[in-house]
Image: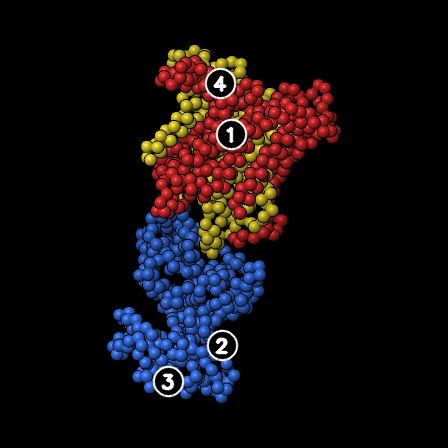
Chain colours: A yellow, B blue, C red
Amino acid sequence: MRALQRLLFCVVGMFLAAPLVIVAGVSINEKQTLAFPPRGFSLAWYAEIFTSAEWRSALFASLGLAASSAALAVAIALPLAWFMWRRFAPWANAVRLLGIAPFILPPVITALGFLSFWAATGFYGQPWTAVIGHAIFFVTLPLVTLTLGFDAIDRSLVEAAATLGADDRTVFRSIVLPLIGPYLVSGYAFAFVLSLNEYIVAYMTVGFTMETLPIKIFNALRYGYTPTMAAVSVFFVAIAALVFGLIARFGDLPRLLGALSKPR
Amino acid sequence: MSGLELRGLRKRFGPITVVDDVQLNVPHGSFVCLLGPSGCGKTTLLRMIAGLEDPSEGAIVLDGEDITAQPTHRRNFGMVFQSLALFPHLSVGQNITYPLRIRGAPRDEQRRRACELLKLVQLPGFEDRSIDQLSGGQRQRVAIARALALKPRLFLLDEPLSALDAKLREAMQLELRQLQQQLGITTIVVTHDQREAMTMADLVVVMGGGRIRQAAPPVEIYRRPADAFVADFIGSTNLLPLQADGRGGASAFGQPLHEIRVPAGSNGAVLSIRPEDVQLTAAHEGMLQGRVSFVRDLGATVETFVDVAGQRIVAVSTPRARTLLRPGDAVGVRLPAESCVVLPP
Amino acid sequence: MKREPPRRLADYGPIAFPALLLLVFFVVPFGTMIAVSFFRRQQGGFYTPDFVFANYERFLSAFFGHVLGLSLLLAVVVALCAVAMAFPFTYLLSRQSRRVQTGWLIALLSVLSLSEVIIGFAWSTLLSRTAGITQVLAALGLMAEPAALFPGYGAVLTGMVYQALPYAILVLYPALVRLDPTLLEAARTLGASPLRAFFDVIVPALRSAIVATLIMVFVFALGSYLLPQILGRPQHWTLSVLITDQAIYQSNMPFAAAMAVFLVLMSLALVGLTLLAGRRRGS
């Protein structure tokens, strides 16, 4: 039985890792070719991310987009999650549904919706439209993590704080915020990572004016083969592993993803 | 200092009335226990006093001031919750000084007060420990220290000892009582454990179905229960249906009880007598005749179950006071008038 | 700090900002798209506000019907495969120690950061003749000679299952990790082998979580745009590909919008049917 379990873990592990191996292998090709197994060895393509003006601008565009849209997503999700926890308002579930809807619809629908909207309002192509687009599209993630976080707050803590003299604002500042802090961070991290790699919404809204990394990678795949795109992917996976590793180091990652608190 | 006054308090949740017309006077400096089975409304009553629930009707008056509309964070009532509600992200010391900190008290005053309070609850030096390092009893004390930090006007506790094991619970009962007397603070404790209430309280308030059944010192509750509910809830008792003869006398099981007086017109009244007051005599010498159905020797006491005309009467005595009876023996039952309480129907 | 309905106007403050943003930037765009689907298309890529069903009629042809059917079928198969893989894995994961769980969770979250393009590219290599797993299989003697498994239906399926798998695992995780371990123990004291107990006790207990995950992966797969293009031939292209094609390259927004609306309606209907069937069986 144990052996079977081990086997399953191995198989799934290999399945998940296989593409990564390919990508990593391709990224160290010496010449500008996407050969696998790699021919030669060179880390030049990793450097290219930062030295090539094109790749650099795409990198910064993606990072900027991810950072700002994740922040906006959190800014939308936090008051909503707080409101639903603090007040008794069943009608607010409609707003929560709106928050979840963009994520569960096929992305092409959302992208199309934004396309027609921005075209109609005349702002089509402006970079900030992508920020709004991504924020709305990914608002589900901080919304889900924050709802989880608020649900985990023991209400008697809030009542105890009130008996000790804390009014609404003080309670929020001294009790609620520290307790949902980890969920804020994880919600932001999810939205950030997903925005970095999102293709279609970005493409449909600002694809012709701004090149994010996923757009550039897709173009590179079609028109100009270069290992840099593989290097970028490995780079991103490394960043994600680092971010989530840090969250795990300083917090309780299983709990952030829905597990119960560690048994004492 | 006139103390706490509850005037006609009612609380409804939809169609259900959880607290019904509670009228109570709590003298300043006294130790009060709200006692009753689960669902009787005692916790809701406590929460209304704390301001965590709004009364549907009625008023709460403290020292002459009507505080019914005052929000919780302004009442300055120290409260210990059943779950203790210690802030997990703060240390022991930070938990205790929380009320001081949010009022902007200077650092050294906070430190001083934390030290003082930890000494009071016998946990000196625990300031920097984290909450999850503490045992159940220790967390209990931290919760008490925190509630007392601002020298509150009222000290409220909701089933504070229910999570502790029996031995620790008994020790904490005494400690709480001593602490309260040392500080002279008006204290209200909610509990479902009648032994706890009898041990700690100056005033026991027995609640059932949202109403106060009786509010009196422990001994009076025990000796003179106000109705069958109280008699049955506190300790154990024998409840015998009485037939009034219309002239102030009464009989039970067809046999007249000469020494028992019953107010006229009280048909359906019930006689309550504690097992330790029931006397068993030789068969022909008792007021009632019956047969022993079961004998239980518990070491410190002996319980004898007697069947009188289909009703079971339990008598309890120390082993030395009685020759050992056996099931099937005929026996007489004597009910001393001074130990009997006639309860309304 | 009582949890009561908001009373003063200021109490509504916190929800105003999210509601406003979601309304303006989600409801309105979505509504615009629905409106556009009824517009009349003009030559040169423009469209005039109108109310015609022409776009929907065009859609109800054999070709598009075929594509719709294909897309739906593919999404269903992907959902089933992904959940069939994810469920036992997540179950076993939840039984491991906290540290092991954390390690795998970090790995899964990192894999999420692979963009669809890269996944497509990696699998195209893995399934190619020259550098893929068939080389390994041939070397081991399990295959006569290396063959190209891509482009093809299987390749698209593999790529999409790969993309959906981390999501499925992460969605099933909370439900499985909170499962009462004594359920399984009780089953075993009653005589069920571990495997038997798994199917008789665990799976039924988590039916709603499984259904929710199936629906989520289904919707996710339905929207897949890049993988069918990279790993499949034109006959494997899903509706999402066609929608984008019409919108961008054929400049036929109304038609694209009509297809999009239809896609949403179809998936909502299927989801609704699934939930209904589940409820009927459960009661």
**Image disc number at residue B345:** 2
Q: Position of residue C255 (x, y in %)?
A: 67, 25
Residue at mark 3: chain: B
Residue type, label 4: Phe
Residue at mark 1: chain: C
Report the residue at 36% width, 29% height from top.
A10
- Is A21 or B138 nearer to us in this picture? A21
Q: Say which residue label 1 marks.
A: C77
Residue type, label 1: Val
Between disc 1 and disc 4, the foreground one is 1
Residue at mark 2: chain: B
The part of the image, by quadrant, that contains residue B197 is: bottom left
Q: Say which residue label 3 marks.
A: B287
**Image disc number at residue C150:** 4
Instruction: Give whichever of discs 1 and 4 has the lower sequence position.
Output: 1
Residue at mark 4: chain: C
